């Protein structure tokens, strides 16, 4: 019902995830992340948000992605109807696809990136999503968006798409959490939302809010005036 990608930028340590589905609210259902823990994507016929949250908690406690996925999957009697992927802070990945997942279903991985999906038009969706991410130059968010568009072009969710989401996290930056919960063209809407987030006044505001590495950050007086002017349309 969904395809997703989780990745770590090896040069910066920034984490990012993206997902799209033929149902509503993929961001709220599937993607979980924290800059001090890692990323997870929990999806499937009967997805468990508990899996996604639990995997993050375990990675925050020091478990690898592989260990976190195994810990969440093994005690769950409904696991055959679920899918889970995870990425830890070191770029380690893991994925589980339940035996009763609606085909095409499965996962693909490369160093620092994992793709998963179910109810897909074909396994080419997984392969195209991964290849587009690996081949696309630029910043992590751009690569994740390119991966979603490539997966959609390769067949997508077999029902088409209704929602899409993008999540980018880092210790030294404000979190970027973008969600298109319902749209006839969710990838185009997500792309437009991302582009807007990189322009003023939003981009400037993100430069002065607290981060994990600078939890007390606030604008200098001259920076505050600039942000205020941009927000009011004076700059």
Image (cartoon, helix red, strand yellow):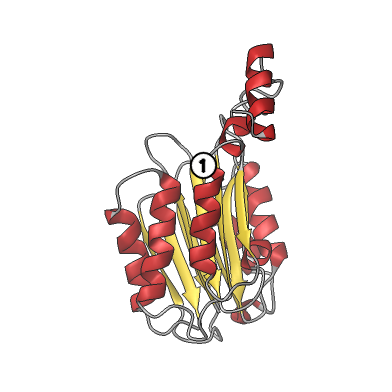
Q: What residue did someone put label 1 on? A: 198
Q: Residue at x 59, y 40 (%)?
A: 35
Report the number of discs.
1
Q: Is residue 31 above or below residue 221?
A: below
Q: Is 26 placed left or right of 12 in the picture?
A: right
- As rendered, which of 34 and 133 lies closer to the eye? 133
At 33% from the left edge and 69% from the top edge, which residue is drawn?
128
Quadrant in the picture for residue 134: bottom left
Quadrant assignment, res 83: bottom right
Residue at 38% over, 59% down: 146
Q: Residues within 10 Å of mark 1 (few under 14, many from 20)?
A: few
**Residue 12 appears in which quarter of the rendering?**
top left
| Residue 74 on image: x %, y % | 63, 69
Work out which residue is located at the far top of the displayed protein and give it.
221
Locate the C terminus and report the quarter of the image it occupies: top right
The x, y position of residue 216, in whole percent, is 71, 20
Q: Give 111 or 200, whichever is nearer the viewer.
A: 200
The one of 16 and 195 positioned closer to us in this rendering: 195
Relative to 25, 11 lies left or right: left
Position of residue 213 in the picture relative to residue 132 (left or right): right
Task: Determine the residue located farthest toward the left in the rendered image.
Answer: 135
Secondary structure category for the residue under label 1: loop
Please provide percent x and percent y for residue 182.
64, 71
* Depth order, front residue of 106/152: 152
In the image, residue 233 sits, relative to residue 177, either above or below, namely: above
Query: Can residue 87 be seen here?
Result: no
Residue 111 seen: yes
């Amino acid at each position: 019902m969904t395809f997703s990608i989780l990745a770590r930028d090896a040069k910066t340590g920034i984490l990012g995830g993206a997902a799209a589905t033929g149902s509503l609210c993929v961001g709220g259902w599937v993607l979980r992340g924290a800059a001090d823990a890692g990323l997870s994507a929990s999806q499937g016929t009967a997805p468990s948000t508990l899996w996604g949250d639990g995997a993050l908690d375990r990675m925050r406690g020091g478990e690898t992605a592989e260990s976190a996925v195994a810990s969440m999957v093994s005690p769950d009697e409904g696991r055959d109807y679920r899918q889970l992927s995870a990425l830890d802070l070191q770029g380690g990945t893991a994925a589980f696809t339940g035996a009763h997942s609606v085909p095409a279903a499965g996962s693909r991985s490369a160093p620092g990136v994992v793709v998963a999906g179910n109810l897909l038009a074909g396994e080419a969706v997984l392969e195209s999503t991964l290849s587009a991410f690996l081949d696309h130059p630029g910043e992590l968010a751009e690569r994740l968006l390119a991966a979603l568009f490539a997966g959609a072009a390769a067949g997508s969710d077999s029902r088409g798409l209704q929602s899409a989401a993008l999540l980018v996290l880092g210790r030294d930056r404000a979190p970027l959490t973008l969600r298109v919960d319902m749209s006839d063209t969710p990838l185009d809407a997500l792309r437009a939302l991302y582009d807007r987030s990189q322009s003023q006044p939003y981009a400037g505001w993100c430069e002065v809010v607290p981060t994990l590495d600078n939890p007390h950050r606030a604008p200098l007086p001259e920076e505050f005036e600039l942000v205020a002017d941009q927000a009011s349309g004076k700059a």
